[in-house]
Image (cartoon, rainbow, N blue to C red):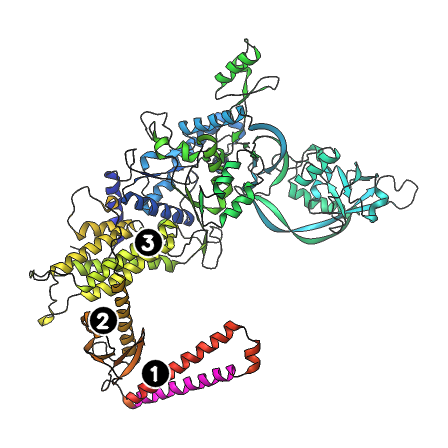
Amino acid sequence: MISKTYNPKDIEEKWYQYWLENRFFHSIPDEREPYTIVIPPPNVTGVLHMGHMLNNTIQDVLIRKARMQGKNACWVPGTDHASIATEAKVVAMLKEQGIEKRDIGREKFLEHAWEWTHKYGGIILKQLRKLGASCDWDRTRFTMEPALYDAVIDTFVDLYNKGQIYRGVRMVNWDPQGRTAVSDEEVITKEVQQKLVYIRYEIAGSAESGGEPDYITIATVRPETIMADAAICVNPNDERYAHLHGKKALIPLINREIPIITDDYVTMDFGTGGLKVTPAHDPNDYELGIKHRLPVIDILNDDGTLNEKAQIYVGQDRFAARKAIIKELEEKGYLVKAEEYKSNVGFSERTNAVIEPKLSLQWFLKMKEISKPALENVMNDTVQLHPAKFKNMYRSWMEAPHDWCISRQLWWGHRIPAFYMKDGTIIVAKTKKDALRIARDKYQLFALSETDLTQDEDVLDTWFSSWLWPMSVFLPSNDSNDPKAAPGDLDYYYPTNDLVTGFDIIFFWVARMIMAGYEFKGQEPFQNVYFTGMVRDKLGRKMSKQLGNSPDPIDLIEQFGADGVRTGMLFSSPAGNDLLYDEKLVEQGRNFCNKIWNAFRLVKGWRVSEDTSVVEKPLAVQWFESKLNQTLIDLEDHFSKYRMSDALQTVYKLIWDDFCSQYLEMIKPGYEQQDQVRPIDQVTYDATINFFERLMKLAHPFMPFITEEIWQEVSERKEGESICVSDYPTAGAVDKALLADFDTLFEIISAVRNLRNSKQISPKTALPLAIKTDDAARFRPLESLIQKLAVVSEISYVTEKAEGVSFLIKSTEFFVNIAGEIDVEQERANIEKELSYAKGFLESVMKKLSNEKFVANAKPEVIERERQKLADAEAKIKTLEENLAAL
């Protein structure tokens, strides 16, 4: 018994469990063409948000379609260990228990981290199942599991031995809250309102003669760093400061002397034209310091507090010290003025702490050579970006990439395989045992033991593991009891086909995966990259918990069903463009499910005639066959160009408009005596059931649950069958002439219905229709459908004008006789009123076109628009006058 209303809760869990039990999502290498997607691994700390919903729905659409097309579809799920985010979570958890990370040591801390990961790490993957994600869950990987861990360590050792990894002191982005370096791409720049303070530096020795001391004024937004100043720099061409060249100045509050130097780098018209040079706390100052051989004085601790080198406010947070220093500068007469000033400030993407430029001893990967194949093969479309506009963004970064700082001052992650001897000698090896062997062989230190070697405390940047993801997920597991991949999988599944991700990690991840692919496999890691936009609210704001404008995806699925949410997300999400989320979108998705369900109930409720005399396919069946085939051609074009939203809209229109609103209305049986519905003939019914099956297959990648339910019910199925492994429809012949005739049919029906509505004539009242044509044969096949759908009593063909209201469709004139169905006098008054308005409008257009000045000065397209208005007005007046005469 088919339920009256569609209830997603009744079927979603049932069918997902059915798919899992029958292992429809599982893939092993065979003779078929592989189609592979690797999931952008969400952070192990994460829960499902709207961006995940969009991203994973698109991946599921692609993988389900490929699976139905007979390809060996493999969608690999997994999670990223997320060094900074996870460590922050575990540190916070321990703090609540009164435990400090440093007090318990590395090993104990890692035990807590693993415990936390096992407890909370799989939440997001379980949530993806509710969405219908058809991942091969047997292949679920984690970036810290043994096989993937080993791959990362092996990669580091390999690159180091090739001379591509080095260790050195360089200016890095320092996150004082996470107490770790972060890459340039992990810094979010925001415009911040700050105070630009003008500070007087006394010129050393200027007051020795007893007169007033001389000063140079410097403008800065970072007065807390004046204690780290190494020089004051002015432009050599700035006449205001020519007398100060070669002299020295005193830093306020601490009175340390610093030189006044000259350099063209200084802009004379910015601020006061004088620049405080602080090499330890500004990347540009650092370069200036190297050029002029200035000392580097780092006054900040790793947590952003001032250290002993600052001499004052030691132990205070940098921002608290800033306020205190401004106050003291003012009290002691060093502060000239302070003004509001907007400037760009870098924030850590992970902790939202203000980034501190800091000189630090770190590990780096040279990017100059390793990036070249990755740039070349995106520019030549070996790897295609969708939309292609992102190629420019990609090129701008890849043409001159900075060396990648790959070390992080954390404990959770892949520990750097570098071992130090007591004299500081570095040995890079996979294990301490290997390092000891290298030390003995290379340095002949046969008495050396493992206790003489100390491993680097740092871990690798999370992206240094995830850049291997398209390869590492296919490496065999070290645990024979948990086989996630087998030998040979990498050769079969790599390179993968499509990557679906957000454009915001084009540099973090996409570019680096391409680099790794060419470096370690000699080919691209994927063929296409589909960039999703950001999900925003309908006001255009980024969704966030703080704003309270982000719905819980699981709540949405509970309310609207997974299929409704999936289609709602895709209705308006063109590649690379932001999606303005509105709950009306998922309501539309739910309504689409209800429309399909009601159509299913309608068709399954029909009685089938036992009369087998009908053997030809009715014209409506022939039309929909062509319409379906044409749509399949259009759909493949959309998929080939990664127009996912357009693909869904095409399926939506075919089902809602063409099938439900047109085709079913054309074939729907009428009534016999006593309101008994007539049976439908077997040929039409069989064709309709076939259409329904094919439509469900077309819609299945977008809305898997309802399509499985209907596909299973619409025809008898054997146990173990599923729509998700059925054959995807392929296009057949398209009768273009028939499609054109039916387009005319629908225009006729629409025109008659609109006329009926405008004249307030009952939709049940049959009206006679006359067609002015010399080619009656063209319309005769459509007569029964016109009569049925437009409620027309009879159709006649004329060569002259006929009685009734006329309308024009593709140069053919039609007349509907409504005499006796309307109030003639009222209708006459309405037409005369409309005619009067039309004539007035025509007169105003003619007046404008007769104005020589307007014609001479207006743009050609404006004049053409006015001429079109003139022609439209004249045509309307003619029709109204004819309708008036027909009354």
Q: What is the quadrant of the N terminus in the image?
A: bottom left
The reply, left or right, for residue 10 in relation to residue 162 is left
Q: CA distance from mark 2 to mark 3?
A: 30 Å
The circle drawn on residue 851 is none
For marks 2 and 3, the one nearer the N-term is 3
Q: Amino acid at mark 3?
A: Leu
Q: Earlier in the sequence, mark 1 or mark 2?
A: 2
Tell me what residue is drawn at x 54 percent, y 17 percent: 453
Q: Secondary structure at mark 3?
A: helix
Badge 2: residue crowd in 10 Å (few <14, some 14–19, many ≥20): few
Judge from the rendering whether residue 521 lies leftward or rightward of residue 7; answer left or right. Answer: right
> Mark 1 vs mark 3: which is more N-terminal?
3
Asked if 407 appears above or below 397 in the picture, the reply is above
Q: x, y percentage for residue 883?
A: 31, 85
Boundaries of the magenta span: 825-849
Which three-letter amino acid code belongs to the residue tagged 1? Thr
State yes or no: residue 432 in magenta: no
State the residue position of label 3: 635
Image position of 396 with respect to 461: above or below:
below
Q: Secondary structure at mark 1?
A: helix
Q: Position of residue 9 (x, y in %)?
A: 27, 51
Tell me the CA gap for discs 1 and 2: 25 Å
Residue identifier under label 1: 879
Q: Please, what secondary structure does the residue beneath circle 2 have?
A: helix
Residue 811, position as x, y percentages in the image: 32, 75
Judging by the rendered image, the residue that carries numbered circle 2 is 778
